[in-house]
């Protein structure tokens, strides 16, 4: 899965890649690993993700919940981007 977006708080765009997309290096990106899974994210988003995993490792799965443990599985990380970070512009090869 590859997600692109724009974070108004940081004033910058972001890219998050999982699976085979994570093998393609995006300029200014780095790898974040957790629970045996790895994603590649742009630097600003990497800091937000690492902080969330360390200090608030939950995410709502929809606008009104429920909250689930934050993992790097595609449906969960996509929910975190949509409902916590915001600014999702496009999703390719994402969960149905």
Image: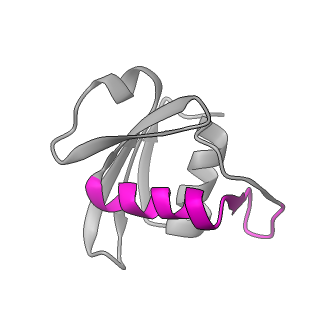
User: Is 96 left, or right, of 5 in this rendering?
Assistant: right
Quarter holding residue 5: bottom left
> Was residue 70 drawn as part of the magenta stretch in this picture?
no
Check the image and name the residue furthest to the front.
54
Q: Which colour assignment does the render follow?
A: one colour
Magenta residue check for 56: yes
The single residue placed furthest to the left in the displayed view is 27
**Residue 85 position within the rendered picture, expressed as x and y whole percent measured from the top left:** 50, 67
Instruction: Note whether residue 66 is visible.
Output: yes
86 or 25: nearer the viewer: 25
Q: Position of residue 34 (x, y in %)?
A: 55, 40
Q: Nearer the viewer, residue 62 or 46?
A: 46
Q: Residue at x 30, y 62 (%)?
A: 44
Going 57% across and 60% down the picture, which residue do you hit? Answer: 54
Residue at 84 percent of width and 61 percent of height: 66
The image quadrant of residue 2 is top left
User: Where does the C terminus fall, quadrant-wise?
Assistant: top right
Question: Would residue 49 be found to the left or right of residue 42 on screen?
Answer: right
The residue positioned farthest toward the bottom in the image shown? 9
Q: Position of residue 37 (x, y in %)?
A: 55, 30
Q: Is residue 79 above or below residue 95?
A: below
Q: Residue at x 65, y 41 (%)?
A: 75
- Residue 5 seen anywhere in this rendered image of the structure: no
- On the rendered structure, is 72 left or right of 42? right
Residue 1 lies, with reference to residue 51, above or below; the image says: above
Residue farthest to the top? 20
Question: Which contiguous range is marked in magenta?
Answer: 43-66
Where on the picture, by quarter, is residue 26?
top left
Q: Position of residue 52 (x, y in %)?
A: 55, 63
């Amino acid at each position: 899965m590859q997600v692109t977006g724009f974070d108004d708080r940081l004033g910058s765009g972001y890219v998050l890649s999982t699976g085979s997309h994570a093998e393609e290096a995006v300029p200014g990106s780095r790898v974040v690993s957790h629970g045996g899974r790895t994603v590649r994210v742009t630097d600003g988003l990497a800091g937000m993700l690492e902080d969330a995993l360390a200090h608030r490792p939950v995410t709502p799965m929809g606008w009104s919940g429920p909250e689930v443990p934050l993992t790097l599985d595609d449906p969960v990380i996509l929910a975190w981007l949509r409902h916590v970070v915001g600014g999702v512009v496009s999703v390719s090869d994402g969960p149905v």
